[in-house]
Amino acid sequence: MAARRLVIVMLVLLAISTIGAALIPPPGDDESGTSDDPGQATRDPQPPAEEKEPAESEPKLVAAEIVVSGMPPKTIALAPGDQLRLLVTAPFGDDIVIPAFGLTETVSESGPARFDLFIDRAGTFEVRTLSSDRLVGRIQARAASRISANGASRPVQTSKEAAP
């Protein structure tokens, strides 16, 4: 008989705690607009801050692809501080290297070589095949350039240039 009463008490406590947990908002969640200040409860909650687009001088994520072919090597223009997500595709299998960053990835007919790197300095960095030592592309990082939508680099207007 005592065990039955104990089970009933435990079930009642479980039901009360479940209802209480459902009704009490989690800590840090202040969407209801309630607070200790009675004048603040009637105000509308502040709208979320709008996301700003990155300024020209802020680092960007640049996605690019190099196709190994008989064409001249492709040049990818960006600025130091940008992040480059590079795919290198080829109709044959080989290792693709970026010696300046010490990176090597394998490319094959069925899958590209993928590089995800942070450009930490200005300069021109070669992208080559390992077996045939063939130049397939260049990564060109210049301090005063940004990549435009069509892939061409354009200078960033500095405060000295902006002055009339």
Image (tube, rainbow, N blue to C red):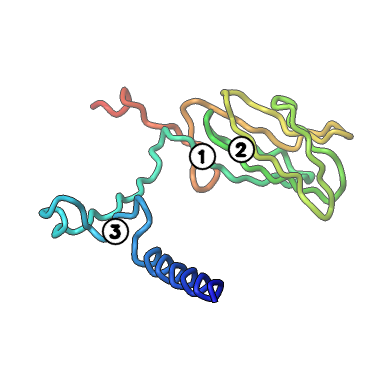
Name the residue tied to disc 3.
31
Q: Quadrant of residue 41?
A: bottom left
Q: Are marks 2 and 1 in contact (CB under 8 Å)?
A: yes
Q: Position of residue 136 (x, y in %)?
A: 75, 37
Question: For this rendering, which residue is in front, 18 or 9?
Answer: 9
Q: Position of residue 79 (x, y in %)?
A: 52, 31
How far apart marks 2 and 1 lie (CA) works out to 8 Å
Of circles 3 and 1, the one toward us is: 3
Q: Quadrant of the C terminus?
A: top left
**Residue 98 - label:** none
**Mark 2 Cα-neighbour bin, 10 Å: few <14, some 14–19, many ≥20:** many
| Left or right: where 10 falls relative to 42 | right
Where disc 1 sits, the SS reads strand
Name the residue tied to disc 1.
147
Q: Quadrant of the N terminus?
A: bottom right
Q: Position of residue 56 (x, y in %)?
A: 40, 36
**Mark 1 Cα-neighbour bin, 10 Å: few <14, some 14–19, many ≥20:** some
Q: Amino acid at mark 2?
A: Ile
Q: Could you tell which of marks 2 and 1 lies nearer the N-terminus? A: 2
Name the residue tied to disc 2.
76
Q: Are marks 3 and 1 in contact (CB under 8 Å)?
A: no
Q: Could you tell which of marks 3 and 2 lies nearer the N-terminus? A: 3
The residue depicted at 76 percent of the width and 44 percent of the height is 113
Q: Amino acid at mark 3?
A: Glu
